[in-house]
Image: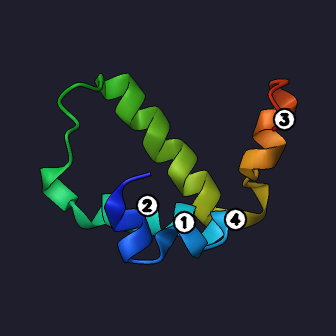
Amino acid sequence: MSPAMKDFGIDRLPPEQRVALALEIWESLGDERPTDRLSSERRAELARRNSELDADPGIALTWEAIRTSVGTGR
């Protein structure tokens, strides 16, 4: 874990709030986002998924649910 995680108390946030914070930081980059490594198809798919999640936040899965679904439930 990076020192900043502890310095800012990020490590004490619930998973949902950490994900929301990560997304907010990512979105704050605006035109500075490193998208040149993504194909236009992948960018379109990410935009589609983001729009889908914005329209219905209830479809989001927790990390625990994802880990369980791929058999690595820790």
* Left or right: residue 14 compared with residue 24: right
* Residues at marks 3 and 2, CA–CA distance in whole angstroms: 22 Å
Name the residue type under label 2: Ala
Q: Give the SS element for disc 2.
A: helix
Identify the residue under disc 3.
Answer: 73
> Which mark sits nearer the N-terminus, 1 or 3?
1
Name the residue type under label 3: Gly
Name the residue type under label 4: Pro
Instruction: Name the colour scheme.
Output: rainbow
* Residues at marks 4 and 2, CA–CA distance in whole angstroms: 16 Å
Q: Nearer the viewer, mark 4 or mark 2?
A: 2
Residue at point 59%, 73% (across, down): 12
Could you classify mark 2 by the number of other residues whose Cα lies within 10 Å: few (under 14), some (14-19), or many (20 or more)? few
Depth check: 22 or 52 in front?
A: 22
* Left or right: residue 69 compared with residue 7: right
Label placed on residue 22: 2
Label placed on residue 57: 4
Label placed on residue 18: 1
* Residues at marks 1 and 4, CA–CA distance in whole angstroms: 15 Å
> Which mark sits nearer the N-terminus, 3 or 2?
2
Depth check: 57 or 3 in front?
A: 3
x and y, in percent, of residue 32 in the image: 13, 52
Q: Give the SS element for disc 3.
A: loop
Q: Nearer the viewer, mark 3 or mark 2?
A: 3
24 is higher (above) or lower (below) than 74: below
